[in-house]
Image (cartoon, rainbow, N blue to C red):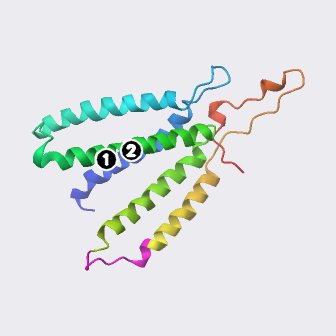
Amino acid sequence: MKSSLMIPILFAVGTALCWGTYGPALGNARSTPDTPPWSPFKPYVFIGVAYLVIAIIGGLIAMKIKGDSFDFGGAYSPARDWGFIAGSLGAAGAFFLTNAVISSKGNTALVMPIVFGGAVTVNAIVSYLKLRSNPNLEVSSMLWVGMALVFVGVVFVAKNTPHGAPAKKATAGAGADATTTPPAEADSPSE
């Protein structure tokens, strides 16, 4: 492998590690039987705070290190505009993911394969649509085979990801509301 590819691959692996643990971490952000209930928007606010702190402070530090200017107007406006659009798409994705994880009762084993299998497929489709007017564009039939394999992979991963045991039924003396599923045991895909 070319050494020039190692850095991008390491960054991609870092992204996969962070985003792969994002869903399970978000699954822990839901209310439990021992706490008052809260909406999925309570953790979403702090997702935004984390984005704000890491993206703005980290971005400004990285710009300074790279010797970039702090001008975002004129010739630099595409960086500002498309950066905002991309950030909005990321925030909207976090919004949908937050609602998916919370409404599935923390079932990240179901949600995360769909998110990431879907994301790679949407990326390929958007790239194709963006480039299709290029007369020299050649699309291998293997792209479509790959998309079908991603779909099959999503189903296999979602169905076979290890998960905790199902919740135990309440005993007659414990009361009807004693049936609960702790967050660590709620990662089973729906049958």
Whole-percent x, y for residue 14 in the image: 36, 45
Please, what is the three-letter code of the amino acid marked with disc 2?
Answer: Gly
136 falls in the magenta region: yes
Q: Residue furthest front?
A: 74
- Magenta stretch contains residue 127: no
Crowding at mark 1 (Cα within 10 Å: few <14, some 14-19, many 20+): few
Distance CA(mark 1)–CA(mark 2) = 9 Å
* Element carrying mark 2: helix
**Mark 1 element type:** helix
- Residue tagged 2: 90
Classify the position of the N terminus by image quarter: bottom left
Label at residue 69: none
Tell me the residue at 20%/33% (across/down): 60
Q: Residue at x 36, y 43 (%)?
A: 88
Left or right of 22 in this view: 5: left
User: Along the horizontal axis of the image, is 9 left or right of 104?
Assistant: left
Mark 1 — residue?
85
Q: Is residue 77 left or right of residue 50?
A: left
Magenta stretch: helix, strand or loop mostly: loop
Q: Which class describes the residues within 10 Å of circle 2: few (<14), some (14-19), or many (20+)? A: few
Q: Nearer the viewer, mark 1 or mark 2?
A: 1
Q: Identify the residue at image location x=33%, y=43%.
A: 87
Q: Residue at x 83, y 28 (%)?
A: 170
Residue 35, placed above or below residue 9 = above
In this rendered view, identify the residue nearer to me: 189 or 72.
72
Q: Read off the magenta span.
A: 134-143
- Give x and y (percent) for residue 191: 72, 51
